[in-house]
Image (cartoon, rainbow, N blue to C red):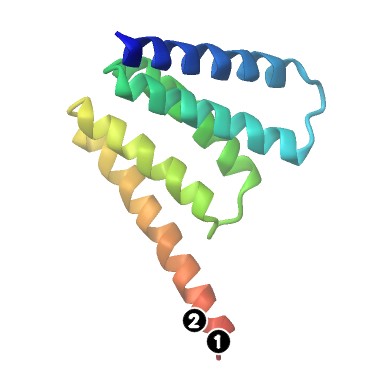
Amino acid sequence: KDGEDGWGLAWQMLDLARVLLQRVSNRSLEQDRMLAETHLRLGDVSMNQDMLEVAEDDYRAGLEIRRRICAADDRLLMEALFVNGMVQLYRNRRDLALPLLREALEVCRTRLARLAGDTL
């Protein structure tokens, strides 16, 4: 029961942060980063409570923001793509999961290529 209360409290705090950040008009880049992170952590809490539909919505919202604000080789974009792919796998939607996971892998490859080029 204590674990359940902890998850519930975590969800409430994160949801409050989400609401406050969404109310900000003309959010800064840092505020968009915080909002994306909040959505993704809400998705994590929902996944831990086996609320896959809710997790999917939050993960998708976080990914949409990160697609807008992250560079093509940003590990934060890769993370958002990966968790979105994983929630689709948990929901038995391989057809939706595989493109997301492939895109996450491509972000990693792009980053590795850039890093390898930086060392030359």
Q: Quarter of the image containing the C terminus? A: bottom right
Residue found at the very far bottom of the displayed protein: 120
Residue 83 versus residue 59 in the image, above or below: below
Spot occupied by residue 90 in the image (x, y as percentages of width and height)? 21, 29
Q: Which mark is residue 119?
A: 1
Q: Amino acid under label 1?
A: Thr
Q: Nearer the viewer, residue 88 or 19?
A: 19
Q: Which mark is residue 116?
A: 2
Residue 104 versus residue 9 in the image, above or below: below
Residue 112 versus residue 120 in the image, above or below: above
Residue drawn at 70 percent across, 21 percent down: 21
**Tag 1–tag 2 contact (CB < 8 Å):** yes
Residue drawn at 43 percent across, 20 percent down: 57
Horizontal relation, residue 70 to residue 61: left or right:
right
Residue drawn at 34 percent across, 12 percent down: 2
Spot occupied by residue 75 in the image (x, y as percentages of width and height)? 50, 55
Residue 70 versus residue 53 in the image, above or below: below
Spot occupied by residue 62 in the image (x, y as percentages of width and height)? 52, 32
Q: Nearer the viewer, residue 106 or 120?
A: 120
Q: Quarter of the image containing the N terminus? A: top left
Q: Secondary structure at mark 2?
A: helix
